[in-house]
Image (cartoon, grey):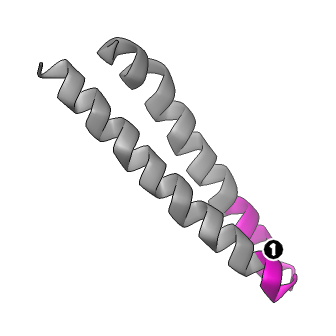
Amino acid sequence: MSEFVVTWLAPIALIAVLAVLLAGLWNMMRGGSANRSQLLMRWRVGLQFLAVIVIMLGLYLANR
């Protein structure tokens, strides 16, 4: 199970964070809506939280 978490879930979570971060930067650079920037910021924070949980779960399962 830990191999699945580390091999698949952690990279997927990190790629999701990167995608939302880049979308937020793109929106800011082109002068997009402030509401969209706020929404992307909230999604990024939530995805970062999820990524940390997944990584910690992988570490816990690997050391078990």
Q: Residue at x 19, y 20 (%)?
A: 62
Residue 30 in percent (x, y) is at 87, 79
Q: Which residues are magenta?
A: 22-36
The answer to which image quadrant residue 49 occupies is bottom left
Q: Is residue 63 above or below residue 56?
A: above
Q: Is residue 21 above or below residue 41?
A: above
Q: Is residue 11 above or below residue 25?
A: above
* Magenta-colored stretch includes residue 15: no
Nearer to me, 48 or 21: 48
Q: Residue at x 37, y 24 (%)?
A: 6
Residue found at the very far left of the displayed protein: 63
Residue 22 in percent (x, y) is at 69, 60
Position of the C terminus by quadrant = top left
* Magenta-colored stretch includes residue 29: yes
User: What amino acid type should be assigned to the residue bearing mark 1?
Assistant: Asn
Residue 46 in percent (x, y) is at 53, 59
Label 1 crowd bin: few (<14), some (14–19), many (20+), radius 10 Å: some
Residue 35 as seen in the image, left or right of residue 2? right
The answer to which image quadrant residue 12 occupies is top right
Position of the N terminus by quadrant = top left
Mark 1: which secondary structure? helix
> Of helix, strand and loop, which mostly describes the magenta segment?
helix
Residue 53 in percent (x, y) is at 36, 44
Label 1 sits on residue: 27
Q: Residue at x 57, y 52 (%)?
A: 17
Nearer to me, 44 or 29: 44
The answer to which image quadrant residue 44 occupies is bottom right
